[in-house]
Image (cartoon, rainbow, N blue to C red):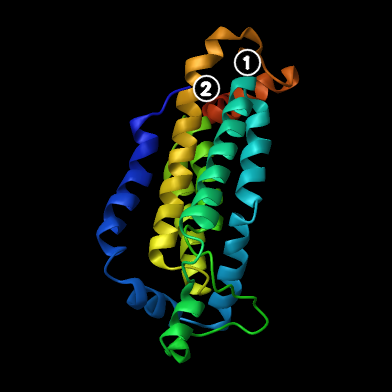
Amino acid sequence: MKVKFKTVLPFAIVLAVFFPLIFVFKEASSIFINSFHTPKLDSFFIKTTWLGEGFMLISALLLILVKKTKWIIAFLIGLAIHFILIQINKLLLFPDVLRPLGYFEAIGKEHLLYRIENLRIYRTTSFPSGHTTGATFGAAFIAFAFKKIRSVAWVMMALSVFVGLSRIYLIQHFLIDVYFGLLFGFISAVLAIVITKRIHKKYAWMNKFLIPKFKNLEVYIEEPDIIEESWNSN
């Protein structure tokens, strides 16, 4: 249970690249991304945003059932951290921050936005993007848990970014909301692993498989070459 550099790298690159943009292109980024509207993109981003509605979290939980109990504990710790970060910011620190539709209505520029018919669009509690935070936590956790799988971190990072883009395209959030959603989700996964690493050696039960029958399944998932060798030997 380690925070490997190769797993951190994809997320760090995205966060570093987008950081200079979040304070400059608030209006422009929303209008620009929203302007590429087509029926196919509408459908794509509506489906993509579902990843942030619990799909990535459920996927992460189901996948780590094949691993030792310490990973389940780490997931629950991270889930709590990500939830606290969202609620503190949305309800306590920034409850009145307007989402794109509310913001553009307030300045009389709502006509610049494209709205998908019958899609409910919120106007307040914009910061941070809860969908992006949840999706990124789930994606980053999968990347850390299955770090031996080639390119898993890059794939998970890409999924997180697409969820974030969907929130901007659907005018549910600004770029800064999505950026901090990515950051908070990633931090939640890292902190969960760091905390669990400090305590799991003290408790023998945390180093056992929750479902013993899945012990060999973990090996097959993390070491795909074993499957190829198994097939070749038959």
x 50%, y 48%: residue? 136
**Viewer-proximal residue among 83 and 48:** 83
Q: Report the Cα–Cα distance between label 1 and label 2.
A: 9 Å
Residue that badge 2 annotates: 196
**Viewer-proximal residue among 207 and 231:** 207
x 59%, y 21%: residue? 70
Q: Position of residue 118 (x, y in %)?
A: 68, 82
Q: Position of residue 55 (x, y in %)?
A: 65, 51
Mark closer to the chain start, 1 or 2: 2
User: Which three-letter amino acid code belongs to the residue tagged 1?
Assistant: Met
Lateral position of residue 126 relative to residue 213, left or right: left
Tell whether label 2 touches label 1 (CB within 8 Å).
yes
User: Which three-letter amino acid code belongs to the residue tagged 2?
Assistant: Thr
Lateral position of residue 17 relative to residue 53, left or right: left
Q: Is residue 140 above or below residue 170?
A: above
Q: Is residue 217 above or below residue 113?
A: above
The secondary structure type at the circle numbered 2 is helix
How many residues crowd mark 2 within 10 Å: few (<14), some (14–19), many (20+)? Answer: many
Give the image quarter of residue 33. Answer: bottom left
**Viewer-proximal residue among 2 and 133:** 133
Q: Position of residue 186 (x, y in %)?
A: 44, 42
Residue that badge 1 annotates: 206
Res. 136 visible in picture? yes
x 53%, y 10%: residue? 201
Q: Position of residue 198 (x, y in %)?
A: 47, 17
How many residues crowd mark 1 within 10 Å: few (<14), some (14–19), many (20+)? Answer: some
Res. 146 visible in picture? no
